[in-house]
Amino acid sequence: STQSTWGLATEAAEKERADAMLTGNPLLNPNADFKTKRRWDDDVVFRNQSRTEPEPKKRFINDMLRSDFHRRFMSKYLK
């Protein structure tokens, strides 16, 4: 009798597992809703603010001492 109850338990577990597999896949689940998930920043007020700011153009100066990099480096590390 223990084998028959164990057999019923495994059959029930197999059926439950099969149902979970069928309903877990949204393509096979007839009740599935295909709504897109909202992003965490959808309701933020200041979103995408930096897109409108113009990016500073990099200028090419053919002089090592007058280049923008050198000027920033000197102002940052040597005062």
Image (cartoon, grey):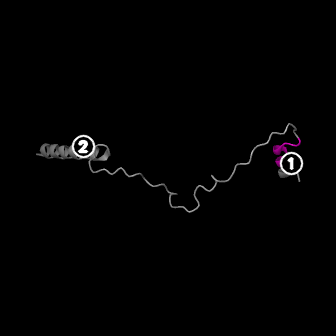
Nearer the observer, 69 or 9: 69
68 within the magenta span: yes
Residue 35 is labelled as none
- The stretch in magenta equals 65-73
Image quarter (top left, top right, bottom left or bottom right) of the C terminus:
bottom right
Q: Mark 1 Cα within 10 Å, few/some/many (few <14, many 20+)?
A: few
Nearer the observer, 27 or 77: 27
Give residue 4's position: percent from left, percent from top.
12, 44
Instruction: Relative to 38, say whether 70 is above or below.
Output: above
Q: Which residue is pictured at 75% across the width and 45% down the height?
A: 57
Image quarter (top left, top right, bottom left or bottom right) of the N terminus:
top left
The answer to whether the residues at label 2 and label 1 have Cβ atoms under 8 Å apart is: no
Q: Amino acid at mark 1?
A: Met
Nearer the observer, 73 or 46: 46
Q: Which residue is pictured at 14% across the width and 43% down the height?
A: 3
| Residue of label 1 | 74
Name the side, left or right, on which 55 lies relative to 69: left
Q: Amino acid at mark 2?
A: Ala
Give residue 9's position: percent from left, percent from top.
18, 47
Name the side, left or right, on which 61 lies relative to 38: right
Q: Mark 2 Cα within 10 Å, few/some/many (few <14, many 20+)?
A: few
Element type at mark 2: helix
Residue 18 is labelled as 2
